[in-house]
Amino acid sequence: MKIRVLGAGAGGGFPQWNCNCHNCKRLRAGELRGTRRTQSSIAVSSDGRNWLLFNASPDIRAQLEAFPESHPRTGVRDTGIKAILLIDSQIDHTTGLLMLRESTSPLEIYCSEMVKQDLTTGFPLFTMLEHYCKVSHHPVPLNGEAFTIPSIDDLRIYTHALKSKAPPYSPHRHDPHPGDNIGVIVEQISTGRKLYYAPGLGEIEPHVYGAMQAADCVLVDGTFWQHDEMSRAGICEKRALEMGHLPQSGEGGMIETLSTVPAGRKILIHINNTNPILDEDTPERKTLEQAGIEVAFDGMEITL
Ligand code: MLT
Ligand code: MN
Ligand code: ZN
């Protein structure tokens, strides 16, 4: 299985256009050892030719341009992206659908009924796309059941509901429903190798922990180092969990959780620009290194 990180940043990216936080300011000034990150997306393939895109970030145009395997190969219009799976309906995971409107066939989109609802009401991208390429929606199961996707059929996909958050514009932002966010297991049928992907993860429920335990690679929520990171940075009072993100540090945090996960690769993704792990010289980054946890970056390639 091949996994390509198209964007490893959280909403806003790194640096964020209007952000003068410790990280963004120093990155712009060339005073931080670390790299820029576009917004949250990966692509997965079993043959290196046909790709399943996870999420469609606002940065998708540049992300695909920098990803030659997705480029057209035959005919006047073509793409290596055969289908799109949305893990939630957040702006950073869906806005890029508008940039795919030139598609010559309906976009094959796999997502929950909840996400479809958001994308036809609060943020009606599906409705808008009816005037362009159209959308062919495939509902995903929420009970961990498996499915396959035509033309990427050596991958078996399992999806389950997660505790995280629906976006602020969702009709059920304050009334959580199963399917507002999902975690995904991707198994390559011919090799049995497994990826677990959950960039927005608020709680390690037993089924989530089980999926992490069984994976060869976990690619999980790396948004915040600590609960009160946004208020410490002087940005806002929202705490990590209120935004649906389990922080890395502290009791029951992501580092502690991953310490009992046997996966060969443990990687954090969807990293907010305030997070000290973006700076390769911080003690927080050292802590991750000592724990065998990697930090995803744009262009990262993982072969399983
Ligand atoms: C989140 O996951 O909480 C988002 O990155 C927020 C956003 O896109 O504004
Ligand atoms: Mn996000
Ligand atoms: Zn910042």
Image (tube, rainbow, N blue to C red):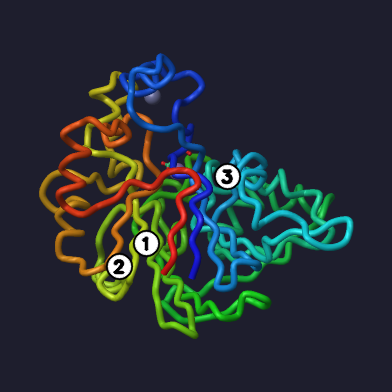
The residue shown at (55%, 58%) is 43
Q: Residue furthest bottom?
A: 190
Q: Which residue is mark 3?
A: 57
Q: Which mark is residue 162?
A: 1
Name the residue type under label 3: Ser
Report, in whole angstroms, how far the alpha carbon at label 3 lies from the one at label 1.
Answer: 20 Å
Image position, residue 9 (x, y; %):
44, 40
Which tag, 3 or 1, sits closer to the chain's start? 3
- Determine whether, in the image, residue 150 is placed left or right of residue 74: left
Name the residue type under label 2: Val
Residue 98 appears in which quarter of the rendering? top right
Name the residue type under label 1: Leu
Asked if the residue at tag 2 contacts the one at tag 1, i.e. Cβ–Cβ closer than 8 Å, the answer is: yes
Report, in whole angstroms, how far the alpha carbon at label 1 lies from the one at label 2.
Answer: 8 Å
Q: Which residue is mark 2?
A: 208
Single out the mark in the foreground, 1 or 2.
2
Crowd rating for badge 1 (residues with CA inside 10 Å; few <14, some 14–19, many 20+): many
Crowd rating for badge 3 (residues with CA inside 10 Å; few <14, some 14–19, many 20+): many
The residue shown at (46%, 55%) is 301
> Whereabouts is ligand 1, in terms of quadrant?
top left
Image position, residue 260 (x, y; %):
15, 65
Please tell me which residue lies in front, 44 or 142. Answer: 44
The secondary structure type at the circle numbered 2 is helix
The residue shown at (77%, 51%) is 129
Q: Residue furthest right?
A: 76
The residue shown at (47%, 26%) is 16
Residue 174, compared with residue 35, is above or below; it is: below
Q: Is mark 2 within 8 Å of ligand 1?
A: no
Please tell me which residue lies in front, 244 or 151. Answer: 151
